[in-house]
């Protein structure tokens, strides 16, 4: 059967689908933050030099920079934090993001209520989410510093990571 015919929703299936919705939010947040951070130096330079170019040239430069770094891997690799020791965390986060976005729900059958091994599967997914969260924490800290704001120290705690994991997985043990 190619088309979806089972549209029944249960409280349990909604919880499972909610997990993947929250994973999508985290993955999108990480992706967007990395690309924004990669674009920042060029945008800052353009804004500093805005008096030396016409308004049209300024708009064109900004448009080019805002459309740059569409590839997450390349965006991550040009970040100074990547070269300064953050490569392992960011590579794991990128790999986790890619796996979660592209493969995590492949093979799910329509009747998720009957999916055997779901608890074990959630454990595997949780490890990927944990890597993604750690990358997001690092990127968020760098952006916070770029904004000349103080980094809330609790964001580096195990408790903060647990809070994010609990938000994602709700009732599942991770």
Image (tube, rainbow, N blue to C red):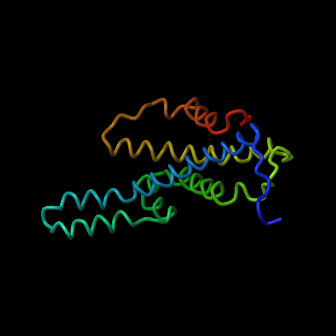
70 relative to 54 in the view: left or right: right
84 relative to 127 in the view: left or right: left
Name which quarter of the figure residue 37 lies in: bottom left
In this view, 116 is above or below 75: above
In this view, 42 is above or below 174: below
88 relative to 173 in the view: left or right: left
Q: Please tell me which residue lies in front, 141 or 31.
A: 31
Image location of residue 121, percent across then percent down: 78, 47
Name which quarter of the figure residue 165 lies in: top right
Quadrant where the N terminus lies?
A: bottom right
Image location of residue 27, percent across then percent down: 56, 51
Q: Please tell me which residue lies in front, 89 or 51.
A: 51
Residue at 60 percent across and 54 percent down: it is: 97
Residue at 39 percent across and 46 percent down: it is: 143
Residue at 34 percent across and 65 percent down: it is: 65
41 relative to 88 in the view: left or right: left
Residue at 13 percent across and 66 percent down: it is: 52
Q: Please tell me which residue lies in front, 29 or 93.
A: 29
Image location of residue 71, percent across then percent down: 49, 65
Q: Please tell me which residue lies in front, 10 or 124.
A: 10
Name which quarter of the figure residue 127 lies in: top right
Quadrant where the C terminus lies?
A: top right
What count of labels does the image hold?
0
């Amino acid at each position: 059967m190619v088309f979806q015919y089972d549209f029944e929703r249960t409280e349990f299936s909604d919880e499972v689908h909610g997990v993947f919705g929250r994973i999508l939010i985290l993955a999108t947040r990480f992706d967007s933050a990395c690309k924004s951070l990669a674009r920042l130096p060029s945008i800052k330079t353009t804004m500093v030099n805005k008096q030396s170019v016409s308004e049209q040239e300024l708009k064109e430069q900004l448009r080019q920079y805002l459309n740059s770094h569409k590839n997450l891997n390349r965006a991550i690799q040009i970040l100074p934090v990547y070269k300064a020791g953050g490569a392992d965390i960011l590579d794991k986060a990128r790999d986790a993001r890619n796996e979660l976005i592209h493969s995590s729900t492949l093979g799910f059958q329509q009747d998720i209520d009957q999916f055997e091994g779901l608890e074990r599967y959630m454990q595997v997914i949780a490890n990927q989410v944990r890597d993604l969260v750690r990358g997001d924490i690092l990127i968020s800290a760098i952006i916070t510093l770029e904004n000349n704001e103080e980094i809330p120290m609790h964001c580096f705690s195990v408790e903060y990571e647990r809070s994010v994991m609990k938000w994602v997985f709700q009732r599942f043990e991770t």
